[in-house]
Amino acid sequence: MRAALVQLTVGDDPATNLPQTLAYIRSAATQGAQFVLTPECTNALSSNREHQRSVLRHEDQDETLAALRAQAAESGIWLLIGSLGLLTSDADGRFANRSFLISPKGEIAARYDKIHMFDVNVSETEVYRESAGYRPGTKTVLADTALAKIGMTVCYDVRFPHLYRRLAKAGAQIITVPAAFNHITGAAHWETLLRARAIETGCFVLAPAQTGFHAETHGKGRRTYGHSLAIAPWGEVLADAGTDAGVTLVDIDLGRVDIARARVPSLSHDREFDGP
């Protein structure tokens, strides 16, 4: 199987971001990709909640989702939309950070709402309170497709290994980690965390990312780390996109999942134990 990691530098206007995303997806498909993955916040990155309320849409009205579904059908590919910021009907007005798996027919095969919210003081000037704007998801998602069994996660989820172990024990062969990873924590932890999740689970880990400086019309902007990665079940880095926006191709042999798990069958070695 050939997969393609799409690395983006989006701004805070979904309509402006969409044409480049579609162009990268078309490019990946013409290069033989059967599975194309975009990063977290594919439609827009914004720190201004009022601006988000003005440009985000409910799922059934979202123009980015509709266009990407149509492109998946036109190209005949499986498409992971890393995530879209979406309006919800929640009383508190919080948004959803929702990942979509789209079939080659353009149908929504699976949805996953990011469970773990990035509420972190990275530095004196880098403070994030994701839960103030986004409501957390409550359900793990494993999509059993003709392509592979795909476990869906998003960004900060990568720091919670029990989520990945549950997906692997349920049968996942590929786990997706679309991200808009902070440039400071990314430099320190991104590759290490992704390799650890692959080694622990014996899964391929595919992590398309946002990169560079994201200018905002209603905010100060932010930086993301880039380095979209594809990791093999034994922990090797198969592809690293660096820091430029674009498409990175990687060929995947799902047989390596069984080989890695046979060499170290830790998924079957859980034991009960006492203590805190």
Image (cartoon, rainbow, N blue to C red):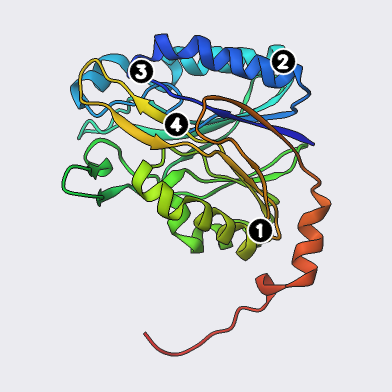
Dot placed on the residue nearer the N-terminal end, 1 or 4 = 4
Depth check, front residue: 66 or 261? 261
Depth check, front residue: 138 or 263? 263
- Residue 147 position, x and y percent, is 76, 37
Q: Residue at x 36, y 18 (%)?
A: 57
**Three-letter code, disc 1:** Gly
Q: Spatial distance from mark 3 to mark 1, Cα to Cα? A: 38 Å
Q: Spatial distance from mark 4 to mark 2, Cα to Cα? A: 25 Å
Give the left or right position of residue 186, taking residue 108 as reference. left
| Residue tagged 1 | 235
**Three-letter code, disc 2:** Ser
| Residue tagged 3 | 57
Q: Spatial distance from mark 1 to mark 2, Cα to Cα? A: 31 Å
Q: Spatial distance from mark 1 to mark 4, Cα to Cα? A: 23 Å
Dot placed on the residue nearer the N-terminal end, 4 or 2 = 2
- Crowding around mark 2 (Cα neighbors within 10 Å: few <14, some 14 to 19, many 20+) is many
- Residue 206 position, x and y percent, is 61, 43
Q: Spatial distance from mark 3 to mark 2, Cα to Cα? A: 25 Å
- Residue 4 position, x and y percent, is 67, 30
Dot placed on the residue nearer the N-terminal end, 1 or 2 = 2
Secondary structure of the residue carrying numbered label 2: helix
| Residue tagged 4 | 211
Dot placed on the residue nearer the N-terminal end, 3 or 2 = 3
* Vertical order, 269 against 207 (above or below): below
Q: Name the outermost residue toward the bottom.
A: 274
Quadrant in which the N terminus appears: top right
Residue 134 makes an appearance in the image: yes
